[in-house]
Amino acid sequence: MIFEVTHVTTYDGYKPAERPLSFEYMGMRYSVEEIIDRWYEASPIAGRPTYDYFKVRVKNGEEFILRHNRMHDVWSVLLK
């Protein structure tokens, strides 16, 4: 899987960057209409990043996977 760093606007609730609200992909801005699924990936090695993943549906029905690197607060989108 190849991810590209992107700008994501988030909802900050009980924790920062709790969930994505909108993001940029290929020069376009997309609003998240629905979070279809979410999961996380943690490394068994101390000091390695933990990732939060979000499978989202946007207004036109397309689906994307967004990834948040908690350690560095960097968002990326899975390239199609």
Image (cartoon, helix red, strand yellow):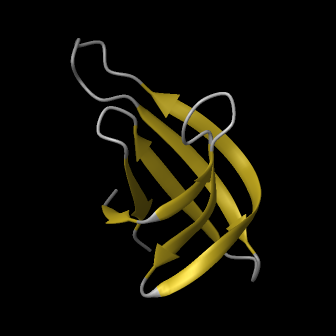
| Between 73 and 49, the one nearer to me in the picture | 73
Answer above or below: position of 46 versus 49: above
Res 43 quadrant in image: top left
Name the residue at 43% across, 88% down. Answer: 27
- Asked if 5 appears above or below 35 in the picture, the reply is below
56 to 63, vertically: above or below: above
Indicate the quadrant containing the C terminus: top left, top right, bottom left or bottom right. Answer: bottom left
Along the line of sight, the residue nearer the viewer: 73 or 38: 73
Farthest residue, direction bottom:
27
Asked where in the image residue 62 lies, by quadrant, the reply is bottom right
* Side of 59 where 43 appears, left or right: left
All told, the count of numbered labels is 0
Name the residue nearer the viewer: 12 or 55: 12
Q: Residue at x 50, y 55 (%)?
A: 66
Q: Nearer the viewer, residue 12 or 35?
A: 12
Q: Residue at x 62, y 39 (%)?
A: 18
Please state the horizontal and vertical placement of residue 8, each as a whole percent of the image.
50, 61
In the drawing, does residue 26 fall left or right of residue 20?
left
Q: Position of residue 52 (x, y in %)?
A: 50, 37
Quick one: quadrant of the N terminus? bottom left
Tell me if 34 is positioned left or right of 2 in this view. right
Q: Position of residue 33 (x, y in %)?
A: 78, 66
Q: Position of residue 79 (x, y in %)?
A: 40, 70
Q: Is residue 19 left or right of residue 71?
A: right
